Image (cartoon, rainbow, N blue to C red):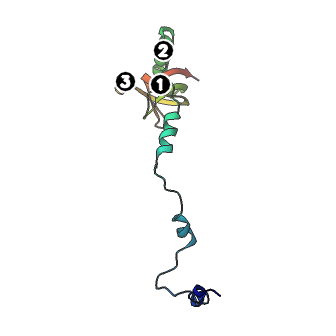
Amino acid sequence: MCKNSFKYEKLLNAERPVSDRARMSNQDRAAQFMPFAALTGFGAIINETSRTTTKKHQLNEDELTLLNENLNKLSETISQKPEVRVVYFIPDERKSGGSYSTYSGNVRRVDEFEKELIFTDKSKIKIENIMLIEII
């Protein structure tokens, strides 16, 4: 036998030392070896950049005339709370552009001061964002 093998003989047969500290859970032990996320939030920035928006359509004269006619008809029949379908633009809060959405409901009133349609369910749509309105 080698001279050094006697040196470690006691360690081979020794029991594990007792510690005063609580044992670490396997999950906490594994967390020590997880990769460090140096670019936290970078994925969200990439996703935001790749998200597409639509440019707001500028109405031509014919479309504006039709929209004004329908708004006038709506104002005349407002006491009946007419049902309408509205296609309108929703500006994006983070980027230029936005998206178009369709909403159907009964109009409670046309607010001339705020320039918006107010529906019976308390939804509001700015008139400047309306592309098309149909009285159903």
Identify the amino acid type marked 2.
Leu
Q: Earlier in the sequence, mark 2 or mark 1?
A: 2
User: Could you say where residue 122 lies in the image, as x and y percent from the top left?
Assistant: 46, 37
Whether residues under marks 1 and 3 lie with C-beta atoms below 8 angstroms apart, the answer is: no
State how far apart marks 2 and 1 are (Cα). Answer: 25 Å
Q: Residues within 10 Å of mark 3 (few under 14, many from 20)?
A: few
Determine the residue located farthest toward the right in the rendered image. Answer: 1
Label located before the other in sequence (2 or 3): 2
Q: Earlier in the sequence, mark 1 or mark 3?
A: 1
Q: CA distance from mark 1 to mark 3?
A: 13 Å
Q: Amino acid at mark 1?
A: Ile
Number of the label disc, if any, that sits on residue 112: 3
- Marks 2 & 1, CB-CB < 8 Å contact: no
Residue 90 is marked as none
The residue indicated by pointer 2 is: 59
Q: Residues within 10 Å of mark 2 (few under 14, many from 20)?
A: few
Residue drawn 52% across and 87% down? Answer: 17
Asked if residue 97 is positioned above or below residue 44 in the image, the reply reads above
The residue beneath circle 1 is: 78
